[in-house]
Amino acid sequence: MEILEWKTVTVCLSLLCLPILLTIIVMIIPVVIFVISALYITAWLIHLRFAQPNARFHLPYHPSRILKINFVALSHLALVISYFPLLITHFVWRYWKTGPSGAREGVRRNIPYCKDGHRDHTYDLYLPVSVQSNNSGLLARVPIVVFIYGGSWSTGSKSFYGLLANMLRHMGYIVVVPDYRKYPEVVIDGIYNDVRQVLEVVGQEGNSWGGDVNRVFVIGHSAGAQIAAQVAFSAVMKEARMRAASEVGAAVVSNGRVNGVHHNGFGHGHGPKMPNIQGLVLMAGVYDVAAHYDFETYRGVEDISAMGRCMGGFRKSFDANSPKYLLPLPQNATAAKPLEGAEGSSTEDEMLTEATSRYLAELMPRVMLVHGERDTTVPASSTIDFYKALGNAILEEDRDTVDVRVRLYKRMGHSEVVTALMSNLFFRNRSTGSLTRDLKEFIEPEIFENSDDYI
């Protein structure tokens, strides 16, 4: 009797639950369809907005690609929301403390560095109090810091970095934050030319600001780090190779190639010249474009990112725009092969490469590489590999004569290496103190004479 009763109860429950279950399924199916549709529509809208404007029309369909694009979009949305305190701080500083013109705080905005009147050919200048009050000109000149922002070579504005420049200004430096043209208006060579023009203006005008043009430091973040490194090392490597070719007696081809190495045309030339850059601070940068393109492909954003298109779209152009591959390889000199049909023996090639390495050690600026270990946009391995490449480019006996250091911060992601240098009305970033101290030590090593922290 008990068994019959249990079966009866089971049948009754089944009859009762079946409609409920069917109702839930009927209700869930539209929700699932809506979520999937929303994911696809979001991914397609992002793709249509950012991906491949100069290529044939296509859309992603694979579910894994759709999920990856949505994950990146949500990550960026969360990042934007986290910027709200900084955004409020920025508006308070810009429109209340400094005023719209910035004159009250020694800020001069939208100064043209090119005569064509282009909206992106301007820079903002931040003067420290010591320079503003130095009417007699008797005080010592201060270092000049040029900040090159990132933005995947396609976005960004100098207006976003007023808080960072203001902090550097309060550290006692003259700060220059330029805008530059971006993809798709120009490809990478146009960006290089803009940054080079900014540096030429710094060399011409820096002394009139109260700065020391012999102490120019360039800070670059993300894409800005790649741009800064490429511009600086192109100039240095061109000079080093020319001196090495003159010393060794190797053939220098008039089209800008020295034993098969193509130069991007920076450094010496007609008209004004860039100042000698004393130091580079490269933050979360891309130094091997092909390797980073593979990383973007793994993340599913290689089409959305402008990097591949801006850099030419081919592996050869990727390598030509990678600071890592500008450097000589004296430990493997045969890797630098002569042009087909060019004269010169392998011994001459080895001598040229070693001479280039010696001159590189003599001419290269001091370098500080900065990266956050939580960076998921540009992995920290990018900085570590470039650090190793710089070491391999210098002959062993010359390594003690160069200053190349790396700083990895455990709590920082991709943007935190910049936002840590921005004042915040609501809270203080825990990494601000260590980062500003490292910058101060790098820019003004004379005040840290007893420090043994160099790498």
Image (spheres, rainbow, N blue to C red):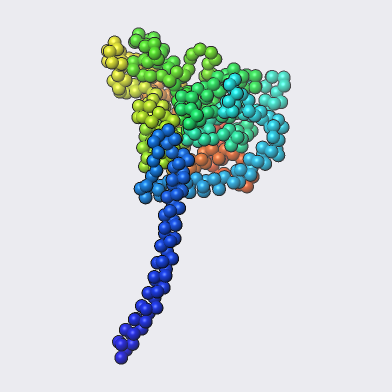
Quarter where residue 237 is shown = top left
Count of numbered tags? 0
Q: Residue at x 51, y 40 (%)?
A: 415
Looking at the image, can residue 382 be seen? no
429 in relation to 237, above or below: below
176 in relation to 372, above or below: above
Lateral position of residue 197 relative to residue 69, left or right: right
Viewer-side residue, 396 vs 347: 347
Which residue lies most toward the front here?
Answer: 57
Quarter where residue 124 is shown = top right
Q: Residue at x 65, y 22 (%)?
A: 209
Looking at the image, can residue 20 be seen? yes
Q: Residue at x 56, y 34 (%)?
A: 157
Quarter where residue 208 is shown = top right
Q: Residue at x 54, y 15 (%)?
A: 272
Q: Dividing the image into 4 quarters, which one contains the C terminus? A: top left
63 in relation to 277, above or below: below
Viewer-side residue, 100 vs 204: 100
Q: Position of residue 246 (x, y in %)?
A: 39, 9
Q: Position of residue 190 (x, y in %)?
A: 49, 24
Q: Dividing the image into 4 quarters, which one contains the N terminus? A: bottom left
Q: Position of residue 383 (x, y in %)?
A: 42, 34
Q: Position of residue 195 (x, y in %)?
A: 52, 25
